[in-house]
Amino acid sequence: MGRRGRAVEAVLLVASAALGVAGAPGAVAAPADGGRQATAWLPQPTGPYPIGTTSLHLTDAGREDP
């Protein structure tokens, strides 16, 4: 893997770790004193490639469900 590949892998690892902590149940709770709630964010992507997510529900009707 080249230098660029390792850099991309490192960025994805950091982003995944940040999202894992921010997305954990109870990770961001309202303060007991009624103050402002903390929020998590990630910077906008700056690379040349579009990124996003797609959810798919795949079904293989040709196979029996175990």
Image (tube, rainbow, N blue to C red):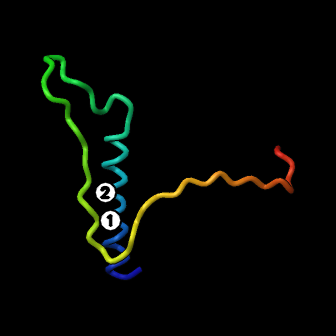
Q: Position of residue 54 (x, y in %)?
A: 52, 57
Left or right: 34, with 46 as reference point:
left
Left or right: 54, with 18 as reference point:
right
Up-down relation of residue 39 to residue 37 (above or below):
below
**Image quadrant assignment for residue 45:** bottom left
Q: Residue furthest top?
A: 33
Say the numbered circle drawn on residue 10: 1
Residue depicted at 34% across the width and 47% down the height? 19
Residue depicted at 41% across the width and 80% down the height? 1
Up-down relation of residue 5 to residue 38 (above or below):
below
Q: Which residue is mark 2?
A: 14
Sort mark 2 into few (<14), some (14-19) or many (20+) by Cα contacts within 10 Å: few
Sort mark 1 into few (<14), some (14-19) or many (20+) by Cα contacts within 10 Å: few
Up-down relation of residue 37 to residue 39 (above or below):
above
Where the C terminus falls, by quadrant? top right
Up-down relation of residue 45 to residue 39 (above or below):
below
Q: Position of residue 58 (x, y in %)?
A: 69, 54
Left or right: 31, with 48 as reference point:
left
Alpha carbons under labels 2 and 1: distance apart: 6 Å
Q: Amino acid at mark 1?
A: Ala
Say the numbered circle drawn on residue 56: none
Q: Amino acid at mark 2?
A: Val
